[in-house]
């Protein structure tokens, strides 16, 4: 039976969250939505750095890293800035990607560099 995309995405985000917690990250928010700007899959903290993490996964032979487009990055960055402004935060932050290929998880930090 074929898994629905939303259900597969939720499963991937749960796997990503577990991976991050095991790596010492504290999960602050999941699926944070900034109206008119976009969504951030996971917001986490580690070593006084705020991480805004975009989770991408794919079942097929297509590598999910190619789903991180300049447009998507702009939305994540704008949403991250909005989040920090509304929370009154002035901290070091990083925009990261979590790539899930089958059950293999890869965290790529500072994807905007």
Image (cartoon, rainbow, N blue to C red):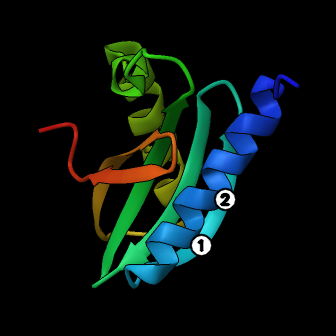
**Mark carried by residue 1:** none
x 59%, y 59%: residue: 15
Q: Position of residue 29 (x, y in %)?
A: 64, 64
x 59%, y 72%: residue: 28
Q: Position of residue 50 (x, y in %)?
A: 37, 68
Q: Residue furthest left?
A: 113
For the residue pair 42 and 77, the one nearer the viewer reads as 42
Choose the circle earlier in sequence order: 1 or 2: 2
Of labels 1 and 2, the one closer to you: 2
Q: CA distance from mark 1 to mark 2?
A: 14 Å
For the residue pair 103 and 11, the one nearer the viewer reads as 103
Q: Which residue is mark 2?
A: 14
Q: Give the left or right position of residue 89, taking residue 46 as reference.
A: right
What secondary structure is marked by label 1?
A: strand
Q: Which residue is mark 1?
A: 28
Give the crowd class for mark 1: few <14, some 14-19, many >=20 residues within 10 Å.
few
Q: Position of residue 24 (x, y in %)?
A: 40, 85
């Amino acid at each position: 039976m074929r898994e629905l995309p939303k259900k597969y995405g939720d499963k991937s985000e749960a796997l990503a969250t577990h991976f991050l917690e095991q790596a010492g990250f504290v999960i602050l928010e999941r699926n944070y939505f900034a109206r008119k700007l976009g969504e951030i899959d996971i917001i986490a903290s580690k070593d006084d750095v705020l991480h805004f993490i975009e989770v991408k996964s794919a079942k097929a032979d297509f590598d999910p890293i190619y789903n991180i487009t300049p447009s998507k990055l702009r939305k994540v960055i704008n949403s991250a800035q909005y989040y920090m402004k509304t929370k009154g935060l002035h901290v070091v932050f990083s925009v990261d990607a979590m790539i899930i290929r089958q059950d293999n998880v890869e965290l790529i930090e500072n994807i905007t560099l």
